[in-house]
Image: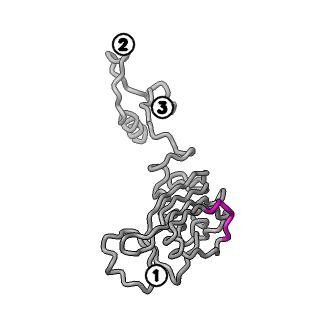
């Protein structure tokens, strides 16, 4: 059973046990700004597109597997500029009531605890999207404002020297056209000019 994609109000409640028993597949779309906690960190630039598949396992537990994606304004942790980024996550969650005894779920890694017999699409996907945000955008996912991290050696002719500063170069190096890279020569000259 596949329900057509439709714009979903953020407070729409899904009867997860019934859907799991039917093996239902749903597609939903939440309006930008529907996920308040995500929107506070990475403001929405488009709707949240969600695909969900409900099922029961051999022990009668309800599961929801799916994918969620949204375009957001991510904050680069290096340059502190915002840029648009596609955030996409996949998940497979065991749905358990708040009152359930969790000792019977030792091999289950990802749990979604719910109060009552319904769950909203926002409850299912918001934490997953928050966990999908990279910790350090410039390191894990390049930002368009990322500074160049290559620092080429500066040629002596390109350096701006003060009027009383003089670069000492080995005569043989200059005559042969080769130069040794001496990164501390300029510091030595600065020290001499101060004294």
Mark 2 vs mark 3, CA separation in Å = 24 Å
For the magenta stretch, what is the residue range? 3-9
- Point out residue 184 in the picture as x, y percentages from the top left corner: 35, 36
Whether label 2 touches label 3, CB < 8 Å: no
The part of the image, by quadrant, that contains residue 107 is: bottom left
Q: Badge 3: how crowded within 10 Å, few (<14), some, or many (20+)?
A: few
Q: Residue at x 54, y 66 (%)?
A: 24
Left or right position of 111 against 119: left
* SS for callout 2: helix
Q: Secondary structure at mark 3?
A: loop
For disc 2, the neighbor class at 10 Å (few under 14, some 14 to 19, many from 20) is few
In the figure, 106 relative to 29: above or below? below
Q: CA distance from mark 1 to mark 3?
A: 78 Å
Label for residue 164? Answer: 3
Residue at the spot 53% in from the left edge and 84% down from the top edge: 116
Q: Nearer the viewer, residue 2 or 122?
A: 2
Q: Secondary structure at mark 1?
A: strand
Work out whether residue 42 can be spotted.
no
Q: Nearer the viewer, residue 54 or 46?
A: 54
The residue that label 2 is drawn on is 175
The quarter in which the N terminus is drawn is bottom right
Does label 2 or label 1 sit earlier along the sequence? 1
* Residue 59 marker: none
Find out whether residue 6 is within the magenta segment: yes
Relative height, residue 160 to residue 74 (above, below): above
Which residue corresponds to mark 1?
A: 97
Mark with earlier residue (1, 3): 1
């Amino acid at each position: 059973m596949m329900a057509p994609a439709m714009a979903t109000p953020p407070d729409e409640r899904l009867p997860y046990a019934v859907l799991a028993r039917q093996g239902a597949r749903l597609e939903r779309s939440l309006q930008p700004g529907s996920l308040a906690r995500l929107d506070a960190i990475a403001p929405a630039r488009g709707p949240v597109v969600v695909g969900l598949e409900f099922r029961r396992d051999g022990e009668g537990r309800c599961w929801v597997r799916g994918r969620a994606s949204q375009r957001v304004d991510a904050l680069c942790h290096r340059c502190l500029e915002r840029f648009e980024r596609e955030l996409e996550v996949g998940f497979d969650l065991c749905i358990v009531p708040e009152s359930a005894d969790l000792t019977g779920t030792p091999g289950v890694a990802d749990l979604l605890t719910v109060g009552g017999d319904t769950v909203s699409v926002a409850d299912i996907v918001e934490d997953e999207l928050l966990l999908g945000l990279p910790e350090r955008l410039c390191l894990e996912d390049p930002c368009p404002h990322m500074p160049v991290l290559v620092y080429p050696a500066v040629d002596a002719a390109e350096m701006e020297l003060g009027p009383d500063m003089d670069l000492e170069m080995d005569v043989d190096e200059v005559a042969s056209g080769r130069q040794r890279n001496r990164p501390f020569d300029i510091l030595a000259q600065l020290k001499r000019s101060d004294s």
